[in-house]
Every structure is written in structure tokens, then in C-alpha cells.
Image: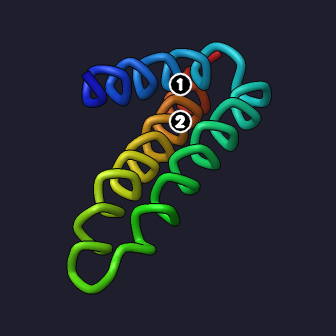
Amino acid sequence: MVIAVVIAGCVLLAVLAFLVPRLSRHPQNGAQRGLGAGSRAGSKAPGGLGRLLSKPFSSSSRALGRSGSAGRRARGRLPF
């Protein structure tokens, strides 16, 4: 279920970044802030368990950032 939400967020953010590049920064930062909080909470677990619990949040945050930047980059390559 969480994977589907992250994928839907990436698609939504990429479309939003393509249509309105400037207005897509705020939703991207908000989503990454929420995932960052999950990552910080997971990393408080001791030892290797902390790394294991925080990794899904950090990789999801990285995926959201990449999809937003890809949408803005694609918009910048348009010929008009």
C-alpha cells in the first residue's frame, strides 16, 4: 500500500512539475519533509535496525525529488 502511494505521488509530482514548474516546488518540499520525518523517526532505532527502518523513507524522498526535477527538465526542453 505504501509503495502504491509513493508511486502515485511520484506520478502526480512529475505531472504537476511538467504543467506548472514553479508551483510544483512547494508540494515537492512538503512531501519530502514528511518522508524526512519518517526517516528521522526510523533512524532512532538502535544499530542496524535504524538504518533498515529509515532506508525506505529516504529512498522514497529521493524518488519524489527525481520525479519533480524530471518533470521540470522535460518542460524546459519543449521547443515552444
Q: Residue furthest bottom?
A: 47
What amino acid is labelled 2 in the image? Answer: Gly
Q: Which residue is rendered at x = 53% and y = 36% of the image?
A: 68
Q: Report which residue position mark 1 lands on.
A: 13
Element marked by disc 1: helix
Q: Report which residue position mark 2 lands on.
A: 68
Report, in whole angstroms, how far the alpha carbon at label 2 lies from the one at label 1: 5 Å
Q: Earlier in the sequence, mark 2 or mark 1?
A: 1
Looking at the rendered image, the quarter that the N terminus falls into is top left
Where residue 62 sits: x, y (%)? 42, 53
Q: Residues within 10 Å of mark 2 (few under 14, many from 20)?
A: many
Where residue 27 sits: x, y (%)? 68, 30
* Left or right: 67, with 37 as reference point: left
Q: Which residue is rendered at x = 25% and y = 29% of the image?
A: 3
70, above or below 50, in the image? above
* Left or right: 55, with 65 as reference point: left
Q: Which residue is rendered at x = 44% and y = 45% of the image?
A: 66
What amino acid is labelled 1 in the image? Answer: Leu
Where residue 63 sits: x, y (%)? 38, 44
37, above or below 14, in the image? below
Looking at the rendered image, the quarter that the C terminus falls into is top right
79, above or below 76, in the image? above
Q: Which residue is rendered at x = 32% and y = 73% of the image?
A: 50
